[in-house]
Image: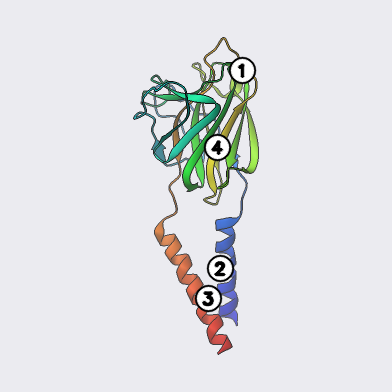
Amino acid sequence: MRLNFLFTSAILIATASLSQADTIIVGTAGNSTLSTPTKPSPSVGSIISFSSLADGGVLSSVTTGGLTVSSPDGVQVIPYSTMYNTPNEIFDASSTGTANLTLKLSGGVNEVGVGVADDDGTTITIEALNASGGLLGTAFTENLANTADVNGNSYFAIADTSYDIYGLKILETVGNVNYSGLAIGDVEVAPTPEPAAFLLLGTGLALFGGLRFRKKA
């Protein structure tokens, strides 16, 4: 009975960690000028680079490395960047200097970092998205005047304890047409769960099922 209880508890904890939407945080901005940015805490993993994208004018969306970036205003690859060591940014083509960017990942991760470039000292909202594209957890409001470096670059990370972040929404409702508007640099994502973790979970489920069957027999 005690062993059965322990396995039941372990399965419930594992299931909760995989499905529960936990607290989402925004990291502090780092210096992203012409170098790899100082990552917020906790740090993230691999970079999805925009360096392979070409400027094809204003498009409804662009896709690279398992990431799709879109906007109702259209997006454009700009062959210039002061963020990281790669040559491209993705620009929201709004004529008013505002932004409504959706970043959609091909799979779920537990942390996403993004460089945001804008000369406007305005406020943006960053939201994490779930698998269906809906809001996950809390939307965060950040004043770029307080987070940007001298070139208008900021760096943010949103994290969750579960691998349930499938993208980000970046909104800027007040813009300045006299400036270049909002663009994003390379996106960083945390590594996906190791296959061994799923194997361990599957083994636990199998053992739990076996114990239940033995008890009934």
Per the image, label 1 sits on a secondary structure element best described as loop
Picture coordinates of residue 49 (x, y %)? 38, 33
Judging by the rendered image, the residue that carries numbered circle 3 is 208
Q: Look at 55% across and 37% down and name the residue there.
A: 168
The relative height of residue 157 versus residue 149 in the rendered view (above or below) is below
Label 2 with label 3: CB-CB less than 8 Å: yes
Label 1 with label 2: CB-CB less than 8 Å: no
Marks 4 and 1, how far apart at CA: 20 Å
Label 4 with label 3: CB-CB less than 8 Å: no
Q: Amino acid at mark 4?
A: Leu
Closer to the camera in the image, 171 or 214: 171
Mark whose residue sits in front, 4 or 3? 4
Picture coordinates of residue 17 (x, y %)? 56, 57
The relative height of residue 70 versus residue 9 in the rendered view (above or below) is above
Marks 3 and 1, how far apart at CA: 56 Å
Q: Amino acid at mark 3?
A: Phe
Judging by the rendered image, the residue that carries numbered circle 1 is 175
Judging by the rendered image, the residue that carries numbered circle 2 is 11
Quadrant in the picture for residue 171: top right
Left or right: where 185 falls relative to 214? left
Which of disc 2 and disc 1 is earlier in sequence? 2
Per the image, label 4 sits on a secondary structure element best described as strand
Judging by the rendered image, the residue that carries numbered circle 4 is 168
Which of disc 3 and disc 4 is earlier in sequence? 4
Q: Residues within 10 Å of mark 2 (few under 14, many from 20)?
A: some
Picture coordinates of residue 104 (x, y %)? 50, 39
Q: Amino acid at mark 1?
A: Gly
Q: Residues within 10 Å of mark 3 (few under 14, many from 20)?
A: many
